[in-house]
Image (spheres, helix red, strand yellow):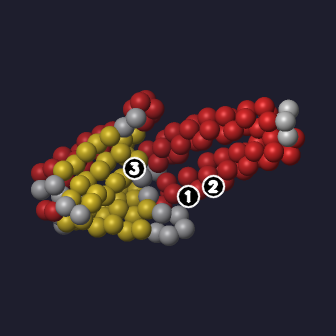
Amino acid sequence: MIKKEIFSPGRRMSAIWQIRLAAVAATAISVGVELLEYSVPLGIAISVAAVAAFGFVGGLYLPAYMRRLSYSLERGRLTVVKGVFTVKRSMLELSLASAVSVRSTPLMRLLGVRRLCVFYPKGRITIPALAQTEAASLALEVHRR
């Protein structure tokens, strides 16, 4: 039985998303500053909205999402729990798995985080933040069955 709470890779994945959000927020703020020439209220509104969105998503939502994220593998069944406002529990009998994929972006590889997707005939189950070794061992375990 493997039961694992995902904390360290989750923090790294939060950092990855915060970097992405900061780039988007910086772009929106620069657009807002450029719009100050033409419309002061619009420029201020866009800049404030960008900072507020970054603060909410990067500071509150992502850490809460990553704290909730967990998986377990026991008796041939993979269970993934994730969500903030609504908690989603996905269960899959490993005998139904048709393929498994471990993916990562360059930034994820730099921080040692992987995303695991287990495909089955009606869809897929994704674990978005795993350590590299953990993703490889879980993929091997799923592939064996």
In the picture provided, is 83 more to the left or to the right than 99?
Answer: right
Q: Are marks 2 and 1 in contact (CB under 8 Å)?
A: yes
Q: Which element type, helix, strand or loop, lies under badge 1?
A: helix
Q: Which residue is mark 3?
A: 128
- Of tags 3 and 1, which is closer to the observer? 3
Residue 28 at x, y percent in the picture:
69, 38
Name the amino acid type tagged 2.
Answer: Leu
* Residue 99 higher or lower than 106, as above or below: below
| Residue at mark 1 | 64
Label 3 or label 1, whichever comes before in sequence order: 1
How many residues crowd mark 1 within 10 Å: few (<14), some (14–19), many (20+)? some
- Foreground residue, 142 or 106? 106
Farthest front residue? 38
The quadrant in which the C terminus is found is bottom left
Q: Position of residue 57 (x, y in %)?
A: 61, 52
> In the image, is 65 to the left or to the right of 42?
left
Q: Is residue 24 left or right of residue 135?
A: right
Q: Residue drawn 45% across and 32% down?
A: 107
Q: Residue at x 76, y 42 (%)?
A: 47
Helix, strand or loop at label 2? It is helix
Alpha-carbon distance for marks 2 and 1? 6 Å
Q: Is 34 or 6 nearer to us in this picture?
A: 34
Q: Secondary structure at mark 3?
A: strand
Q: At label 3, which amino acid type do we have?
A: Pro
Q: Earlier in the sequence, mark 3 or mark 2?
A: 2
Q: In the visual, does 95 lie left or right of 83?
A: left
- Report the residue at 81% width, 41% height from top: 43
Marks 3 and 1 sit apart, C-alpha to C-alpha, by 14 Å
Amino acid residing under circle 1: Ala
What residue is disc 2 on?
60
Residue 116 vertical position relative to residue 93 in the rendered view, above or below: above
